[in-house]
Amino acid sequence: MTHQKVTVGADWLHDHLLEDDLVILDGSWHLPSERRNAKEEYEKEHIPGALFFDLDKHSRQDTDLPHMMPDAAQFSREMGSLGLSHEMTFIIYDTKGLFSAARIWWMFRHFGIQKVYILNGGLQAWKNMGYKIESGLKTKPKTNFLARVENNLTIDLEEMKKAILSKESPLLFDARSSARFLGREAEPRPGVQAGHMPGAINIPYDSLLDNAQKLLSTKDLQRIFDQKGFTPHQPVIATCGSGVTACIILLALTHLGYNTFALYDGSWSEWGSLRDVPIIKT
């Protein structure tokens, strides 16, 4: 299997920082319980030239579910307001190392952007190298952006139900912690039940990362997926609490060279809030 480049290192980014077609996005997002303001943190310190990408603002607004994928019209309008275009090369990072950046990476791929990568290890990896940081709010002149939706990269509730009932159902990988997956820990969102979907396999997102919050080696990633019963060309659906950390599973699979997978966008925030779907607690 041919491995695919999905991340860049801090040294690579430093060497290419001034290239005209390179755009850096701070895609930091924090759980409400953390009481952190990602935009305020960005304004205090960020990689030189980086724009702030507000995950909640640039997500679908006509739903109570958190940061759902916007439609093409909204995405086009808001990416144009940020001054972005398809021809640019995007480097996305967050302050945790590898967390919310993967969701934005997947969002860009969903809308047909191919030249998008993640800074492995995030802002901390940049700072660990002693590279310069800056403060303030960075903007770019507006552009005309036309999103092109890539089919089958993101699925909705009805498609998720069909997949579970299918005789040839895909592997379903859940990126939440084992305690949440097994229903031993209450869900952080009110009204959401504990447990997991029938047939789901738990791959906690942090099991794919090392102590520096970087993707594990190719060998170690392949070993983990092999142990979970994955085989080449087998369809996979990734899920998590709200469609953020599931994208770390998709990032790892893409790095390994696989491409038959999708994100269940509503994830457990949607499934666990329903009363007419099967939920497993064990």
Image (cartoon, rainbow, N blue to C red):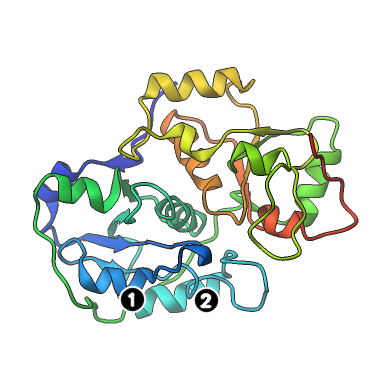
- Quarter that holds the C terminus: top right
- Quarter that holds the N terminus: top left
Of residues 185 and 13, the one nearer the viewer is 185
Kindly report the distance in space between the C-alpha atoms of the residues bearing marks 2 and 1.
Answer: 12 Å
Amino acid type of the residue tagged 2 in the rendering: Gln
Identify the residue position indicated by label 2 in the image: 74
Mark 1 crowdedness (10 Å alpha carbons): few <14, some 14-19, many ≥20: some
**Snapshot quadrant of residue 134:** bottom left
Q: Are marks 2 and 1 in contact (CB under 8 Å)?
A: no
**Residue at image point 80% right, 30% down:** 168
**Snapshot quadrant of residue 4:** top left
Mark 2 crowdedness (10 Å alpha carbons): few <14, some 14-19, many ≥20: some
Residue 65 location, x and y as percent?
Answer: 66, 67
Circle 2 — which element?
helix
Amino acid type of the residue tagged 1 in the rendering: Leu
Q: Is residue 144 visible?
A: no
Q: Is residue 17 left or right of residue 223?
A: left
Name the residue furthest right.
276
Q: Which mark is residue 238?
A: none
Q: Is residue 182 visible?
A: yes
Q: Is residue 269 left or right of residue 232?
A: right
Q: Is residue 166 left or right of residue 170?
A: right
**Residue at image point 20% right, 66% down:** 45
Mark positioned earlier in the residue sequence (2 or 1): 2
Circle 1 — which element?
loop
Identify the residue position indicated by label 1 in the image: 82
Residue 270 location, x and y as percent?
Answer: 73, 59
Vertical relation: 115 (above or below) 146: above
**Residue at image point 59% right, 77% down:** 61
